[in-house]
Amino acid sequence: MDKYPEIFLKLKIKKEIILDELWELTQNYLDKHINENTECLEQLELLKELENTDEFKILLDQLEMTKDSLNCLYVDFLDTTCESSLKKDKIIALKGKFQDEIRTHEIVRAVDCSKSYAKQFYLFDGEVLEKEKRTSLSSKKKEAILKRDNYSCVVCGEVESLEIHHIMAIMGSSIMELHDHDNLATLCKDCHYLAHNGNYHRGLAYENIEGFWEWTKHTEKTKIWFILKDIHGVGSKITENIYQRFKTIEALENASIKSLSKVNQVNISLAKRIKVTLESRAK
């Protein structure tokens, strides 16, 4: 009988519960101590105070123990089932067994490899494949794309910190296809980050090339992200939830704390901090 799926699932669930408890503890603590006049530096000091509380330390210790247990599970799996000593084969074995549920940092720890090497392997239709090594874009190709896009970000029009974005990292495609003009676009650093859903290694904010150009039209969503991204507790998922309810910056600025707190994953404390940020920006 395969013992790994059951133990793995239990540990993953336990980890998520602890993370949820840490989140709830943090939000409740901030909700209790923050008001609309609290400055950002004061918020950071409050977070430092929270991290020194016994309750927070206990949860953090539980989280670390759960991570250690997961790592022991991965190592035991490799020792039991993977005959090869090659790191490549170990990574393939782990990703093949635990699929998308195992994170890159967990692979790095279990296999003792670099993060960049672990990221060379990806799942495609349940099979673990190794990425084809890319060659850098030539200066001539970069200049051609920049010129085509009027030396500005195709999303927000920014002219500084420009980067060339591969619209689709097409699985099994050739280097030539990846570097084709139709698969390249000019983005500023922030919009490039958004195009990758706020994480360069976990998917895109759209499904295909047509979807990319449709995505570039959602400039209000991008602007909302820029406003909210530096607020502690706001990630890409919460930004998406806020955008679904408030489609423009004007609508967001006019929102009350009560209406903000009705957004999924936004409690009163976070709603207050969002409101303070919006009001500070308007001054």
Image (cartoon, rainbow, N blue to C red):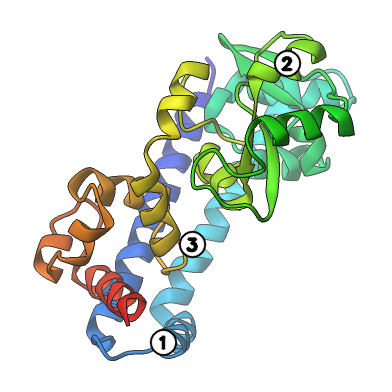
Q: Position of residue 140 (x, y in %)?
A: 87, 29
User: Does residue 192 appear to the left or right of 219 in the view shown?
Assistant: right
Q: Which residue is mark 2?
A: 180
The number of discs equals 3
111 in relation to 54, above or below: above
Mark whose residue sits in front, 2 or 1:
2
The residue depicted at 49 percent of the width and 47 percent of the height is 156
Q: Residue at x 45, y 72 (%)?
A: 58
- Mark-to-mark CA distance, 3 and 2: 49 Å
Which residue has dot 1 on it?
46
> Hey, what amino acid is under mark 1?
Leu
Q: Position of residue 136 (x, y in %)?
A: 86, 30
Q: Position of residue 174 (x, y in %)?
A: 78, 9
Mark positioned earlier in the residue sequence (2 or 1): 1
Q: Amino acid at mark 2?
A: Asp
Which numbered tag is attached to residue 96?
A: none
Q: Which residue is mark 3?
A: 62
**Depth check: 195 or 182 in front?**
182
